[in-house]
Amino acid sequence: MSMTATLPRALVLTLCLVASAVTIGRASKSEPVPPRSPLGQLPMAFGGFAGGRAVDLDPAVLQVLGVDDHINRVYRPDGTRIPIGLYVGYYMTQRQGDTMHSPMNCLPGSGWQPVASGRMQIAIGSQPVEVNRYLVEKGGERMLVLYWYQSHGRVVASEYWGKIYMVLDAMRLNRTDAALVRVVIPVSHFEADGEQTAETLGVRFVRGLFPLLEHYIPA
């Protein structure tokens, strides 16, 4: 039996990704720049939600993220004060070492710990979209986090598949541009079904947001 056959599948995948990433990094760094609108032009109101600017991200955080364009906003459903956090980070290229990573790598550093995790399907028209679904907690407060990776007309929940597609698209299209989309909804202490209420609101928000993203995350 060969050594490769005895290695865990995940390790083999990781080694392949690393080798591919090195190849991409050494390849021509001149990528086509697809036309897109700046994220700052994303509407402040859509689908019954009204938005406003959230607290600016710390420059040190932005440097670590390495994004080329981003927004950090708070939206509220009409007639309520429930804050829904929206972060979108867009990378024009991931060849320089600035790559997307899971928000769940960052939230624990801010004190938020995962309580439950999984994935869920959200129907966008007739097309189901799979997103990550995390319930996180800090100091007795809970939030529902929905996020996904989006590029070239494709939505991916898995960080690993996102990297695989990045390698394939780099070879096929000479493009590594992509975006991370994260939606955060507070879970009410005062409702027995607060988590389900947050999920319903989050799904409604994503359904209103998703059709708009094609103008800012090019296919």
Image: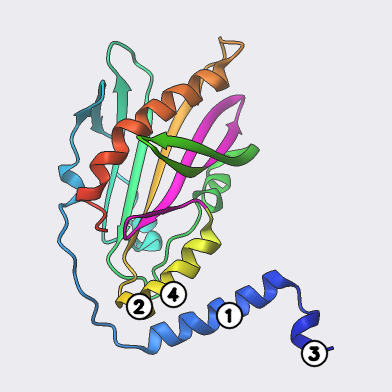
**Image location of residue 30, percent across then percent down:** 23, 82
- The one nearer the camera, 109 or 145, is 145
Give the total number of marks visible in the rendering.
4
Report which residue position mark 4 lands on: 167
Q: Amino acid at mark 4?
A: Val
The answer to whether residue 5 is above or below residue 180 is: below
**Image location of residue 158, percent across then percent down:** 53, 55
Q: Quadrant of residue 205?
A: top left
Q: Considering only order in the chain, which callout, 4 or 3, is on the residue closer to the N terminus? A: 3
Question: Tag 2, which secondary structure?
Answer: helix
Report which residue position mark 2 lands on: 172
Instruction: State the extent of the magenta-drawn residues as a range.
Output: 132-157
Q: Considering only order in the chain, which callout, 1 or 2, is on the residue closer to the N terminus? A: 1
**Mark 2 and mark 3: Cα distance apart in space:** 31 Å
Residue 16: which disc? Answer: 1
**Mark 4 and mark 2: Cα distance apart in space:** 9 Å
Question: Tag 1, which secondary structure?
Answer: helix
Res. 69 visible in picture: yes
Q: Amino acid at mark 2?
A: Arg
Q: Considering only order in the chain, which callout, 1 or 3, is on the residue closer to the N terminus? A: 3
Q: Residue at x 50, y 26 (%)?
A: 199
- The one nearer the camera, 23 or 207, is 207
Q: Amino acid at mark 3?
A: Ser
Secondary structure mostly seen in magenta is strand
Whether residue 156 is in magenta: the answer is: yes
From the viewer's perspective, is 186 left or right of 49? Answer: right
